[in-house]
Image (spheres, rainbow, N blue to C red):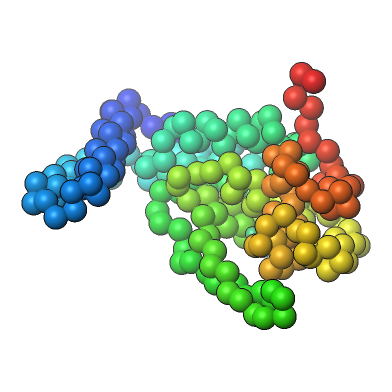
Amino acid sequence: MATKFSDKCNQIRARVFARRNALTTARMVSLFDPNSKTSEARIERAKERLAEAEAEMAQHCPESITVTLENGTKFTQDRGVPDKSAKNARDLLKDKIPADDVTDLTEIKLRDDPPPDTKSVRRKKDGKTVNITVKAAATYNKKTKTINDYHPTKEDELKHEIGHHVCYHRMTAKERAAWDKLWRDKRDTMPTDYAKTHEREGFAEAYEFLRNNKELDDDIRKKMIELAGANPSTGGN
Ligand SMILES: [Zn+2]
């Protein structure tokens, strides 16, 4: 298992990232001039150039690199994920999440392939059942204790998934039952619509809000600190 991309591989990766940007730019430019043949040709050319660089990357780079973090969690970065995203994720784990929260977490994978299909969840709202569509930008597997985070990697998604890990593996059954009771009582004041769909999603969303210092209902915040612990001190204020 590779732990580092070679210099040659990194040169090719840089080219892939530049060409992805070029394709995005070509697409944005075409929005202002949707019927132009020139825009279409520019997009096609950008796609070809990107495909060439990606083929070269596939030939010269391992699919991913894996390092083991201090607490034993494996940290995997696909070759198509920029190093800056990987650094942000590692800094988040180091500075913004209490070490206890990720104890026993087997692996975090920053992936470059597309996320799984969008899922639709049902919830009751004012007596009516409505569907909420959720794009799974990241997933947590409670059996393997693995987080898959699909590029572009966002901190909030990673926090949400760590929230699931805390709930399933860092809390007792009794603590989960206490949360479930609070969730039922406080469902309408849960921080997001998604948090209202299920007890476990409610916990993961509340965890993300707690770690981000975002506003939470007082009772929910109190319970979250009791169950998941306070935020790490920033050393400043
Ligand atoms: Zn979730």
Whether residue 111 is visible to the viewer of this picture, yes or no, is yes
Residue 161, percent from left and from top: 64, 52
In depth, the one of 194 and 54 nearer the eye is 194
Whether residue 16 is visible to the viewer of this picture, yes or no, is no
**In the rendered image, which quarter is residue 232 located in?**
top right
Q: At 53% across and 67% down in the image, what residue appears?
A: 133
**In the rendered image, which quarter is residue 91 located in?**
top right
**In the rendered image, which quarter is residue 19 located in?**
top left
In depth, the one of 201 and 31 nearer the eye is 31
Residue 88, above or below 172: above
Residue 143, percent from left and from top: 66, 62
Residue 166, percent from left and from top: 75, 51
Q: Where is ligand 1, by quadrant?
A: bottom right
Total marks drawn? 0
Horizontal side, residue 13 vs residue 92: left or right: left
Horizontal side, residue 165 vs residue 134: left or right: right
Q: At 47% across and 63% down in the image, what residue appears?
A: 116
Horizontal side, residue 54 vs residue 75: left or right: left
In depth, the one of 171 and 45 nearer the eye is 45
Q: Residue furthest bottom?
A: 128
Q: At 58% across and 41% down in the image, what residue appears?
A: 155
Q: At 80% across and 20% down in the image, what residue appears?
A: 237
